[in-house]
Image (cartoon, helix red, strand yellow):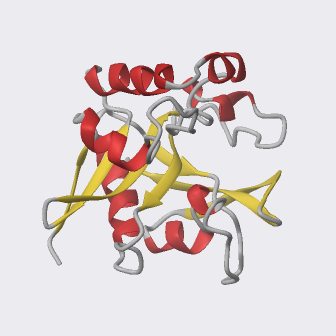
Amino acid sequence: MAVEVRPATRFADVATMLGPRKDPDATVCWCLSHRVDSATNKSLVGRERGEYVRRLCRRKVPPGVLAYDDGEVAGWAGIAPRADLPVARSTKIDAVDDLPVWSIFCVRVRPGFRGRGISLRLVEGAVELARSQGAPAVEAVPVDNQGKKVDLTMAFVGTRGLFESAGFTNVADTRSVTAGFPRVVMRLPLG
């Protein structure tokens, strides 16, 4: 398997991972639900969501990373400075400290590519993107599923085990629950 992880600068590839499957006017997540504030998220409908992501892909700092398996788009991880994300204002997920960490908020692997370790490669690639931008640490708030199966629809936050495999450690509990599992703050210092 030749998996390569690169910054998400090609909109067509991001659309393969995040866009609507059939109806281009459908209002799907586009990985904006955890990137933008609630009012902006609600105001973007149909194709506007994709156009917003297109603009993100043109920025100096891309909105995440993509995994390619033998050249085919296989996965996505969204990452940004925590201060720029809704999680920074969460009433259920407290900041651990004032360190300007970056946060991985979504990890997705396309059907047909799952079970090959691509999620781990995406996390590692997201960490490298944050490192290249001078981030002092990277955080994630995955579910602590204790090895139990997580519904794929809600698995986008990742699992504690995935982030432990990438060298992250649990630094805090939260009051947030996803798919019936508690979420924890995992951190990887980059210093």
Spot occupied by residue 37 in the image (x, y as percentages of width and height): 66, 22
Q: Is residue 14 above or below residue 148?
A: above
Quarter-wise, where is residue 67 in the image? bottom left
Spot occupied by residue 58 in the image (x, y as percentages of width and height): 26, 21
Q: Is residue 178 above or below residue 29?
A: below
Number of numbered discs overlaid on the protein picture: 0
Residue drawn at (58%, 32%), measured in percent from left and top? 27
Please identify the quadrant where the N terminus is shown.
Answer: bottom left
Q: Nearer the viewer, residue 117 or 151?
A: 151
Residue drawn at (71%, 23%), measured in percent from left and top? 38
Spot occupied by residue 85 in the image (x, y as percentages of width and height): 59, 29
**Furthest-front residue in view?**
23
Spot occupied by residue 63 in the image (x, y as percentages of width and height): 38, 33
**Furthest-bottom residue in view?**
147
Q: Nearer the viewer, residue 144 or 189?
A: 144
Q: Nearer the viewer, residue 143 or 169?
A: 143
Residue 132 visible in this rendered orientation of the protein: no
Q: Nearer the viewer, residue 80 or 28?
A: 28
Residue 45 visible in this rendered orientation of the protein: yes
Q: Is residue 62 above or below residue 117?
A: above
Q: Is residue 10 left or right of residue 92?
A: left
Quarter-wise, where is residue 60 in the image? top left
